[in-house]
Amino acid sequence: MFNPLPMQRIELSMLKEDAPQAALLLANYGSFDPEFSEASPELLPELPGEAYRQSYAETRARLDKVLAHYGIASPESVAAPMQPVAPQQLAEVVTWLKMVWDKCSEDEERVRKLGEEHRRIAQLLKGLSQFMNISVDLTLLQKKSALLDVRVGTLPRVNLQRFEEALGLAGYAAIHFLSNPEQVHLIIAGAAGQAREIERVLQAAGWRTTEVPAEFRGHPADVRRELAERMSRLIGQRRQEEEQRHAELSQDNLRGRLLDAAHTLARAAPYAELADLMRGRGSLATVSGWVPEIRLPHLRRMLAENFGNRFVLRARAPRADERLLVPSVIVHHRWLRPFASLVLNYGVPRYGEIDPTVPFAVSFVLMFGMMFGDAGQGACLALAGILLRRRLGQYAPLAVAAGLSSTVFGLLYGSVFGFEHLLPALWMAPLSDPLRMLGVALAWGVGFILMATVLTIRNRIADGCLREALMDSHGAAGLLLYLGLLSAAWHYATEGALDIATVLMLCAALAAILIHVWQKNPGIATGERMLISLMEGFESVMAYISNTLSFLRLAAFSLNHVALSIAIFTVGSMMHTAGYWLTVVLGNVFILALEGAIVAIQTLRLEYYEGFSRFFGGDGRPFRPLTLGNRQKLAF
């Protein structure tokens, strides 16, 4: 629960002819994360599955295109029999799919051309709409005449009056056939001999020529009718293509054969996936990887049942120098999965590192409840988590847990939908003693930081970093410094002075931290080295103080929650009965939605920045086992 599962690095050696079956067995086993072999390339220079991998990749891509062409979803599970796919069988699938794809590619090309023609005609119809208000043979607007200069274009409306005056002086006439607030569509016509002079007028007025497509031959209504008929024929042809495609699926059981090919490739996928990692020499093939220690006996039995004595399986525990390479297998109850998901958003625990999911879940729920304590609103949140569990998915337990925590703290505060006189407080109302609330929040922060620092020390010892565990500002020296700061604050508040033990504790802790920082920075000037040490020592002191004060937001948000409720009741009291209750209901909805989200974000911030940043590396390697179908991980 608090650590990733112990892992074993295995090396499986087998006959090359057994490699496809071994890959299929390992995928069905579901607990093998492949890794590069430790054997040198000189000892095992061959890649036994490289040709197989290339053939598989080509076939997989082709099958995906064929399935997409026919609108068939790729199967999510692998159908029996669970037999390995030999290279010859894969080659047969390759040949057959090539024939199918050749036919599909012809269909795709026809459909593509139909689609392009459909888009072109749609664009023509859109362009034709601007000419529907004129009764002119559009062919005349396309021809160039030696006697008549006809042009179609647009003009900014602000220039229209001066433009028409200039046209009149040049002997041109203009017809407005479409307009909008910004521009006017015009047809202008005049003697061809004046074309050169009119060019200057057009340029000065901001004229933009509108090209009349060659397809526009005849009056606009006739052109539209012709284009609509062509569009109708295209739609019919596309419908025929779809019907033909569906008919092909029923011919020669094409759908069934395609699904069989998909199952075949699914069974070929494990060997193809291992091809880059599998090494070999002669008739021998070897593959390496990681398996959970508790699953190793099952792997041995499975291999023995299928290969007898035709394999060698070697297993060992991870070495200290490869801890970052070992995948982390995290096992949680389903109620912890939403919290595990939030942990993984920050990072993956290293192998051997404390998995923070359980302390994160407990502290998250408690801090949320303390900041959002209301029995009624908490019950609504928990009920929403239950009723919307399908929509919320794995996050439904988080909503239920947060709602129940809010309900419990609401009972402690005596608050139900903001009313504080319906139930007696089992502890106290936050506004009745704000200083006490601040003290509780501060005490929680102290405990949280102490726990995080202890976890940091434990993780660094597990990583073999003994010096950092003892002398770093987040290690034992940092813990001693923090305890000294707490002791100093206590003695100064109660006695007005520090005792000698506290002073010695602070001096010893700071000395250890300064020495550690000094030793971490060799090779730089003495003055700069001293400055870095002093700055990091000062930063350590300020970080512990600021991080502790950061937890005062627990009390601040609990007080803010009450203040918002008071504001809602104050506004409601200014209205009549119906208005009062409407204000109360809408106000509670507002608090539940907006403040609930803000409190959740603040809780997550405290977890990430005051907790995880101290002890959680988050740079581990996720466990990605070789699998069949869409199954991602094995449930232990």
Image (spheres, helix red, strand yellow):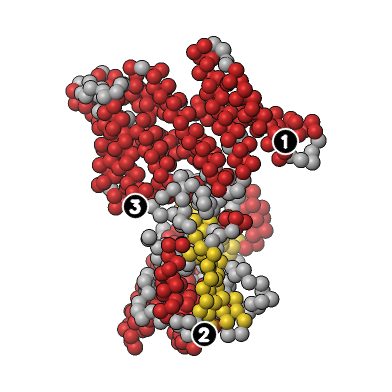
Please give the name of the residue rendered at 51% of the width and 58% of the height, measured from the top-left corner. 327
Residue 43's x, y, as percent?
Answer: 66, 77
Contact flag, marks 2 and 1 (Cβ < 8 Å): no
Residue appearing at x 43%, y 65% in the figure: 295
Q: Relative to residue 417, is residue 311 drawn left or right?
A: right
Helix, strand or loop at label 3? It is helix
Label 3, on which residue?
Answer: 334
- On the question of residue 278 being in view, the answer is yes
Instruction: Determine which of the numbered discs, if any, sits on residue 17 in the image.
Output: 2
Pick whichever, 514 or 177, lies toward us: 514
- State the mark number for residue 260: none
Give the amino acid type for the residue marked by disc 3 in the picture: Arg
Position of residue 149 relative to residue 437, above or below, is below
Point out the tag, 3 or 1, that comes first from the N-terminus.
3
Horizontal and vertical percent for residue 209?
57, 58
Image quarter hosting the C terminus: bottom left
Q: Which amino acid does label 2 sit on?
A: Glu
C-alpha span from label 2 to label 3: 41 Å
Task: Please name whichever residue, 258 or 439, is drawn nearer the observer in this view of the structure.
Answer: 439
Look at 60% across and 25% down and name the residue there: 505
Q: What element carries label 2?
A: helix
